[in-house]
Image (cartoon, grey):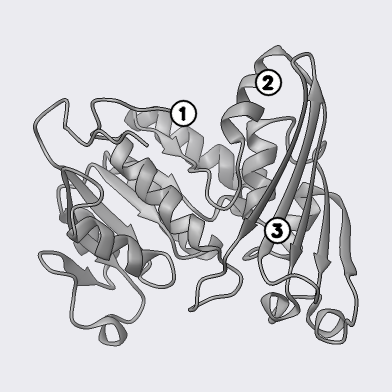
Amino acid sequence: MYVNTASPTGAPLALGLIGYGAIGRPLAAAVLAGAAGPVRLAAVLVREPARHTPAPEGAVLTDDPAEFLRRPLDLVVEAAGHAALRAHGEAVLAAGCDLMVVSVGAFADDALLERLLAAARRAGRQILVPSGAIAGLDVISAAAVGGLDEVRITTRKPPAAWRGTPGEAQALAASEPALLFEGPAREGVVLFPQNVNVAAALALAGVGLDATRMRVYADPTVTHNTHEVYARGAFGEVHLTLRNVPTPENPKTGRIVVMSVLKAVRNRRAALVVGL
């Protein structure tokens, strides 16, 4: 694979992170190792700084949103959950930063999405949604230009991935694949906010949260977080299957999520970007 990390502007991108857990911590390490190209980690916003010491090299670690946004930041990556996006998204955009959203399932709340879009337009900034744990968003979004007739997604994860969700009891008792939810993506991402952000990203790329159909399984026969996507429209048909290795820190999150966010960050300063 060809990777070009040369900066078209010559200026390193100043990066801020909201969250320093299963996604934020390895992302910070990759940036500090140079894997994102000319990107400088400037600040990290967390709820409890004492839990995350020492701070990443060269970055301010703080629980104060004002202190975080006093840093000159070009891009902020939200990797801390729906509540963090609600709490900080508008302020990030108003401060003149582009905002990369990992917890895209929060956009099942139309009012939140409209507030953030309005803030982005006022500030002349962008809200960016990386592919995350799902493949084919470029295909789906391109196909949507010509018209899509149907989009559906089936998600299968091992029972342990459903701890702390409304399906926990059913999942942990399952000896065979157990259907936890079937219906529109808007309902599913609200029920399982940490597990199916992929469905929200797929819906935003395609036919919307209400028209995108989803099924969610707790499946003791799988060891990977598995997403099967089907779409049909004027372009033809596409079937995609992705089997993600879960992160050791959080079985709800696949390792590919960090890789996807890192690639999206790297693209902001790359001279050559493939896959728009």
Closer-to-camera residue (254/224): 224
> Is label 3 in a helix, a strand or a loop?
strand
Asked if residue 246 lies left or right of residue 270, the reply is: right
Cα distance between the residues tagged 1 and 3: 22 Å
Percent across and percent down for residue 238 are 75, 30
Residue drawn 17% across the image and 32% down it? 6
Amino acid type, residue under disc 1 in the picture: Gly
**Foreground disc of the pair 1, 2:** 1
Q: Secondary structure at mark 2?
A: helix
Residue tagged 2: 143
Query: Which label belongs to residue 226?
Result: 3
- Secondary structure of the residue carrying tag 1 is loop
- Say above or below: 248 vs 104: below
Question: Relative to 77, does residue 67 appear above or below in the rendering?
Answer: below
**Circle on res. 275:** 1
Image location (x, y in percent) of residue 23: 42, 65
Which x, y percent locates residue 55? 18, 75
Give the mark nearest the N terminus, 1 or 2.
Answer: 2
Q: Quadrant of residue 216?
A: bottom right
Quarter of the view holding residue 251: bottom right
Quadrant showing the N terminus? top left
Residue type at mark 3: give it. Answer: Thr
